[in-house]
Amino acid sequence: MKKQDILESLKYMRGLEKGRKFEQSVDLAINFKGIDFKKAENRIEVDVKMPHLTGKDSSVKAVVFLKDKNFAQQLKDKVSRIVMDDEIPNLKKKDVDNFMAEYNIFLAEGPALVSVGKYLGQQLAPKGRMPKLIPQSVQSVEQAMKTATTFTKITNKKGKFMPVIHVTVGKEKTPDESIAENIMAVYSGIIDVIPSKEAAIKSVYVKTTMGKPIKVGEKYDTKAQLDAAPKAGKEAGAVK
């Protein structure tokens, strides 16, 4: 899938939009072929690192690994969770799984980062969750939280195991360039975890909350194609 195709589809999608009384989300649907999702081992669940906030859940929940107790006291009311260096060796696999599910920002000061690497690295590194190194200043933590990239869990393990993935990739006010980069991140993340890679991708659609699904890669430049756009909804499904 080419970024330019995504940008052209987003441009066409916006051209069809009617004014709404609320800011709509921009959603992505990826349809699959040749994969039996009734089998549990084939179902998709992957954490994708999007380069831009989607607006769906812009809350920042940070876990910070620290050794300095004075620094920990300064950050007490500024982060969601503080884990001290002497706690790290005692964390169980389930604890770390819970961290990855609950927090979207991982930070650590130097000494604590060494312990994280030693005891938690095998679990965090494959998921791209190794903490970002921070100096001992409240301002550095606040800046890291402000600019940090967030993760989105993408899965079709719930529900009726349909051969489709739905995910929010931005808001109406999000620039097309940022939405396209989020879409590329999602697409790449999914390709990495399915056996037949791009051969398993049947189609890709973008749409706004109340808008018509637009197939990425199509050239929407005629009235016939415009009239056909609503029919795409049958394949793209109800993007949530």
Image (tube, helix red, strand yellow):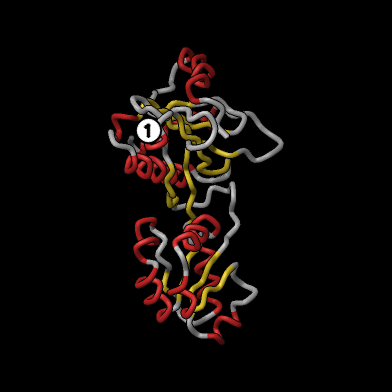
Which quadrant does the N terminus fall into?
A: top left
Q: Considering depth in this image, is 191 or 222 the residue closer to the camera?
A: 191
Residue 47, position in %: x, y?
44, 49
Residue reaching furthest to the right: 21
Residue, x 65% and y 40% (percent of image)? 23
Which of the 4 image quarters holds residue 31? top left
Q: Position of residue 150 (x, y in %)?
A: 49, 55
Residue position for label 1: 5
* Residue 226 screen position, x and y as percent: 50, 18
Q: Is residue 81 visible?
A: yes
Q: Is residue 96 above or below residue 219?
A: below
Instruction: Tell me if residue 239 comes above or below residue 148 in the rendering.
Output: above
User: Which residue occupies the foreground of this view, 205 or 89?
Assistant: 89
**Residue 10: in sight, yes or no?**
no
Q: Name the residue at the top extreme.
A: 224
Give the percent coordinates (x, y) of residue 71: 55, 83
Seen in the picture, residue 92 relative to 140 is either above or below; the reply is above
- At 46% from the left and 47% from the top, the residue drawn is 178
Indicate the amino acid at tag 1. Asp
At 50% from the left and 75% from the top, the residue drawn is 140
Image quadrant where residue 126 sits: bottom left
Viewer-closest of 63 and 57:
63
Label 1, secondary structure: give it. helix
Q: Quadrant of the C terminus?
A: top right
Mark 1 neighbour density, 10 Å: few (under 14) some (14–19) many (20 or more): some
Q: In this rendering, is residue 215 above or below 194? A: above
Viewed as shown, does residue 56 lie left or right of 95? Answer: right
Front residue of 9/196: it is 196
